[in-house]
Amino acid sequence: MGSAHALAGNARAAEGAEAAPVAGGPIVELERFIVEEKASDQNSLSPMARPVRGIFGDSVSVLDIPRSVTVLTPEAIKQYGLRDFSDLEKVGAGTARINYFGLPGSPVLRGVKAGVYFDGILRAFQRNEMPTSFGSIEQMDIVKGPAPAHFSPTLTGGFVNFIPKAPYFEKERYAVSLTLGSWDYYHAQLDAGAPFMLGSKPAAYRISISGQNADSYYDRVKNDYLSVYGSLKTKLAEGLTLTVGGEVYHYKSNENPGINRPTQELIDHGRYVIGEPADISSAAWGGNAVRTLVEFPYNQLYINPSLNALAIPGPTARAAISPALLATMIDLNDPAQRAALYSLQPNVENLPKRTPAQAAVAQAALDQAAKPAQDAYVYTKQYFDAGGKVLTAPIEGNQVLSDSNDYADADDFIAFFKLEGTHNPDRHWRNQLFMEGLETDKLSTYGYGVSTRQFVIDNKFTVTEWHDFLDTELNYGGELRGSYARTLQDFFAEPFSRRDITQGTISTNSIILAGPQRDPNGRNLWSPGIGANLRSQVYQEALFVQSSSKLMEKLTLHLGLRGEYAQFCSDLPSQVDRSSATLKGNLKDNSDKPYYMASISPVFEVTKGLNLYAAVQVGTGIDPATGGVIFGDNNFTETELYETGVKTALLDGQLVNTLAFYYWDQTKYSERDGAVEPLRGQGIEWESTYLVTERFTLTSAFTAQRVNVRKSTVGYGAIAQTEQDWALNGGILNSARDRTMPNNPELNYAGSPEVTASLFAMYEFPFGLGISGGPQWRDGYWHNFDHTIRIPSVVLWNANIFYRYQSWEVFLAMTNLTNEDYYTSAEPTFAGNTLIGKGLPLGWKLTVSYTF
């Protein structure tokens, strides 16, 4: 592991190199533009191992950046085991994750969604269509707070900037790695590259192919993908270079939505509420449940509400419940009781009265159900009034709401072209063209489907100038961006808790047709309501300027300004069979919007290696809905950030610390409500890296953060339920709008720990053996907004053992070393009251790598 001093020496040596041999071929003359690309220490964990390029200057030390930034080198990515955004919580501060149905498409920073950039260009937004591919990246920077002016606008939490795999400039290289691990995990990667002559032009290339075939700890959940990446850089003329590349990524899996029927009893004692409602399967619906009996708006006003209550299988009920209490339940073997159950109920006082047409719809739905006799007993209110108890059973963490017929398949491609010119030592320009296309199709048999299509093309032209006046670095330019997005969703019938996941088989009574599937009339099931489906096009034109000037010897001032104009149009996709003319009219929009971002960030050098900084940024961000669609003005969110902090690089750069205090305001778009949700966040972050010796490194982090909703109610979502509530209402989704939270009057966000800390150590012996690892502590936190379910604190230990010898490396990574039993939360606004996750037990991955 190299030190900061070794890095500087390597950089100087690289700058002086003129040529290097290509194995098995002639000597290739290497231009300086090629060799100087390697001036970084990829085997270090230090944030000083390389400069941070393009965020607050052309090439800046992390010490001089006026933000909290986590710099991840290739070694850091390997040691922390970062394979997708769900792993970011292992490293740094402010990176605690909110679990959105198991697929980490976007990072979460400082408690809210964050953006993803590829070499400074904003990627297509995807919330959880698939895990964003790491197959094209070599390093990354995690930046807290909204993107600076010369970046496309994103949200207040921050962003991750991917640094793509660069061509191998100094010599021919090949690398092969094979990984196997827990739960039938298999992964392979081939990486190759070399300098070469492209005609008469010096050039270099890089190819990286990654493939994975894996089951998971969770039943019936896979995680397979294939990534093919390539890049090439060539010198077209003196001072003019071209870099091109791209990635094709194919992902095939399904969601991991977690354990349904969450209760505190489940967390504390591992007991799950058992049973499934009376059978409403129907031949008209392919042998599955009659969807219209559970679809929004629910028919509980028109049918017997006991049709939504759970039923206990006869043998289980008779063994656990006394005959007197059984008499208060509905016996599904009794023809008279069964007939009453499958019938319309009278109009209920104080509730809206049904019309004859509504009654006819409800009756037709009931008529479709087969209504078979069942040896089972249905819970009733009379049962509980007489002292009856809810029957529960132990559950394992791998038992989740999943089906082998579920899928979450996606294809993503990116292409990039970068032309750079340096004809003047005081001026550098670059033109970046980036394209991305993303397609995803998902279906879950608990009643959810989605299909998205996106295409983004972005061209950014940037000029960087250096001026003697105030020692100023000036970045200015323009950006043109166009995006097309189409989202089809079905969330009008999601009875998550209808299925008893402790059963060995999946009953047709718990399968709800959704999305592209067909109803008895031959129509697809894409939801007809506002918030579900949209097609949009957005065109953005921007001018920006970013400067860094030394006002005094020790005071540097960063200023940023971006003016942007967006034109957007939207309408309802033609694929929605059940849409109405009114809905089509309501979703038509053709509008425009001018907006801006402005920032001011001073950095004061108290003494060498000790900087104070502050940052203020205000303006507009963009918060797309599922699949990247823009519904209108509400997706353009107002953002404010106020941050101050201290950074140190002491002991000759061996000890690097960042202490940050921040406060932000932001509005977030809710497609479920079709409205904005004002949020506020504040917190403290501390990160430290100490190169104790050349072979021993310590890193640590601490986060204390809080996000709250700045209004009196939270948006549409499921209602918190007790064990008795699940017993009486498990067959449908109980939900409400404008929910008040008496136990949470400040509406503090739930779903992730507010306080976390971590410590990681790495030591490499002289003979090639190395060990690394450490604990992560997560304080206890509320699972849901209602503050009825609390997840206890936990300490998780991860450890690695590795051995490097010449061209070989063997790397064993172990997670949850002490096999802690713990839970993870679900997205709190909507899903927190319907799902909860079980954390992974002890797991391992063994990687063997050979470089030649």
Image (cartoon, rainbow, N blue to C red):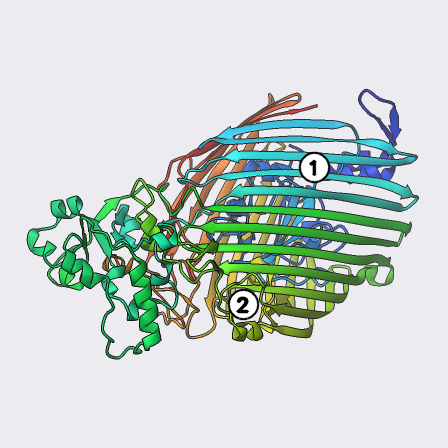
* Nearer to us in this view, 141 or 136: 136
Residue designated by label 1: 41
Q: Quadrant of residue 168?
A: top right
CA gap between label 1 and label 2 equals 41 Å
Q: Mark 1 against mark 2, which lies toward the viewer?
A: 2
Q: Position of residue 840 (x, y in %)?
A: 41, 40
Left or right: where 174 falls relative to 514: right
Q: Quadrant of the N terminus?
A: top right
Q: Quadrant of the C terminus?
A: top right
Secondary structure beneath dot 1 equals loop
Q: Amino acid at mark 1?
A: Asp
* Residue 595 numbered mark, or none: none
Q: Residue at x 77, y 59 (%)?
A: 553
Q: Residue at x 37, y 59 (%)?
A: 291
Whether residue 95 is visible here, answered yes or no, is: yes
Left or right: where 247 falls relative to 95: right
Q: Position of residue 279 (x, y in %)?
A: 27, 53
Secondary structure beneath dot 2 equals strand
Residue designated by label 2: 669
* Nearer to us in this view, 645 or 274: 274
* Nearer to us in this view, 366 or 670: 366
* Nearer to us in this view, 201 or 574: 574
Q: Position of residue 416 (x, y in %)?
A: 75, 48
Whether residue 725 is visible here, answered yes or no, is: no
